[in-house]
Image (cartoon, rainbow, N blue to C red):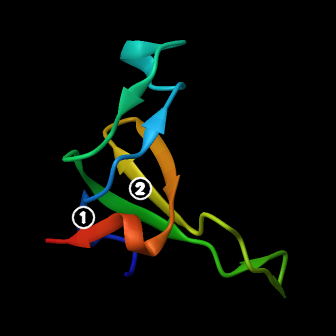
Amino acid sequence: MEPGDQVKVGQSVVVFTHPEHRGEAFDLEGQQGVVHQVLHDWKGRPISPTLPIVVAFGKYRAHFRPEELTAL
C-alpha cells in the first residue's frame, strides 16, 4: 500500500479516540479511508512499527496493520 490508496477496514478495530465518539468504544470495521502515510523510517533510520499504515478518515487518522485493511 502506498499513500493515496483507497482502503477499507476489513477487520474489527475498536478505537476510543474517534472525535464523534470520544471515550466510547467505536468499531472502524467497514469504514473507508485514504492511506496517508506508510511508516518505514524515523529520521533516516529504519524502524519496524507494530502499526505501520496511517489511514485518514477525513480529519481523523488511525494506525493499522496491513492485514486489517483491504485495498479498493
Secondary structure at badge 1 equals strand
Report the side of 44 relative to 18 (left or right). right
Decide if residue 16 is on the left or right side of residue 11: right
Q: Position of residue 4 (x, y in %)?
A: 31, 70
- Relative to the observer, which residue lies in front, 3 or 66? 66
Above or below, 36 relative to 39? above
In the rendering, at what x and y percent does residue 59 appear?
39, 35
Q: Nearer the viewer, residue 10 or 63?
A: 10
Name the quadrant of the C terminus.
Answer: bottom left
Circle 1 is placed at which residue position? 7
Q: Quadrant of residue 26?
A: top left
Q: What residue is drawn where x is 27% and y is 72%?
A: 5
| Mark 2 lies on residue | 55
Q: Amino acid at mark 1?
A: Val
| Amino acid, disc 2 | Val
Q: Give yes or no for contact between labels 1 and 2 (Cβ–Cβ under 8 Å).
A: yes
